[in-house]
Image (spheres, rainbow, N blue to C red):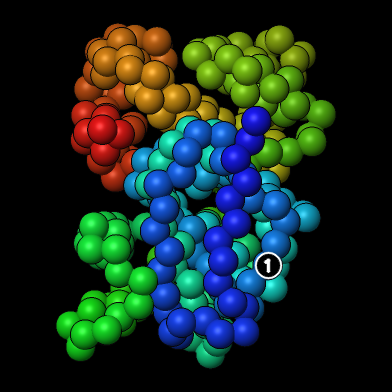
Amino acid sequence: MPIIYNPIIDNNNPPDDIFFVHEVFEPDTSTLYHSHYWGQLHLVTNGIIELSTHNNRFLAPPRYALWIPAMVEHKSYIRRSLNYCSMNVCSPLSDQLPTYPCLLEVTDVITAIIEDLRQRQIMIATTEQDKRLIAVLFDQVLLCKEHDQFLPTSEDKLLQPILIELEHNPTNNLSLTQWAQQLHTTERTLARHYKNKLGISFTEWRQRRKFIYALHLLRQGMSVNETALTLGYHQASPFITLFKKYAGATPDQYRLRLD
C-alpha cells in the first residue's frame, strides 16, 4: 500500500524567505495534489522523483532539479527510496525564477551545497556563514540551464511505436535506420519528428531512457559491468561516461549513495 507523505508547514507562516526540507523517502511513497504559497525546487541525490501537475508529468534524476512555482498544484511519487531535499523560495525571491514548472540542470556547486545542508540538517540559515552559503546557492539556481522535460514524450503517430517499445524495453538497440524501415518511412523523416516533437535527437532520447533504466538496475544490486552489458554496451567505459553525463557521478559513486 502506498505511503502518503504530508509535510506540515503552515502556508501562512513560512519559516524564512528560503528554507529547506530534507527527507529520506521510503519506497512507494506518494503525495496527493497540493500547492504552496512559495515556489519549491525538488532535488534528489539518488533515484528519480516523479511529479505531476494537472498538465504535465516530470521525471527528475539527480542532475536535474524540478521547479514548481507558487500555487501550482502538484503530486509526486517515489518508486524507490531516495534522499530528497526541497528548497522552498518565497516571494519576492521566487519571482526571479520561471513562472511555470520546469527542470533546472544542477551544477556541481549546487550539489555540494545541498549535500552540506542535508548532512547538517539545515532548514533555515541561523548563522552569517550559512546565510552567505544560501545566497550563493540561490545565485547558482538562477544561472541553471532550463529544460522542459528530462524524458519528453509525444502522441505523434510516427514516434509512438518507438517511444512505447523503448519505454517497455530500454535495451532495444534498433538504429533509427532500422526503425524507419519498420515504420515504412525514412530516417530523415524520423529524425525530423524527434527534433520537432521532442526537442532532442533519437540518440539522446534513447540514452536518457537507458540512464533511467540503469538507475533501476544499480539499485537492484547489479554490478556496473553487468549493467553496461545489459544495456548493450560491450565494455563499461562508454556506459560510465553516459551515466556521469546525467548523474554527475560515476555508477560506483552512485551506488555508494545508496548505502
Residue nearest the viewer, comparing 25 with 176: 25
The quadrant in which residue 8 appears is bottom right
| Residue occupying image coordinates x 60% and y 11% | 178
The answer to whether residue 86 is seen in the rendering is: yes
Element assignment for label 1: loop
Q: Amino acid at mark 1?
A: Ser
Horizontal side of 231 relative to 170 (left or right) equals left
| Residue occupying image coordinates x 64% and y 50% | 31
Horizontal side of 208 relative to 53 (left or right) equals left
Q: Position of residue 77 (x, y in %)?
A: 60, 42
Residue nearest the viewer, comparing 245 with 29: 29
Image quadrant in which the C terminus is located: top left
Residue nearest the viewer, comparing 5 with 218: 5
| Residue occupying image coordinates x 62% and y 23% | 167
The answer to whether residue 241 is seen in the rendering is: no
Q: Is residue 36 above or below residue 195?
A: below
Q: Position of residue 78 (x, y in %)?
A: 54, 40
User: Residue under circle 1?
Assistant: 35
The quadrant in which residue 43 appears is bottom left
Badge 1: residue crowd in 10 Å (few <14, some 14–19, many ≥20): some
Image quadrant in which the N terminus is located: top right
Q: Is residue 174 above or below residue 240?
A: above
Q: Position of residue 225 (x, y in %)?
A: 26, 13
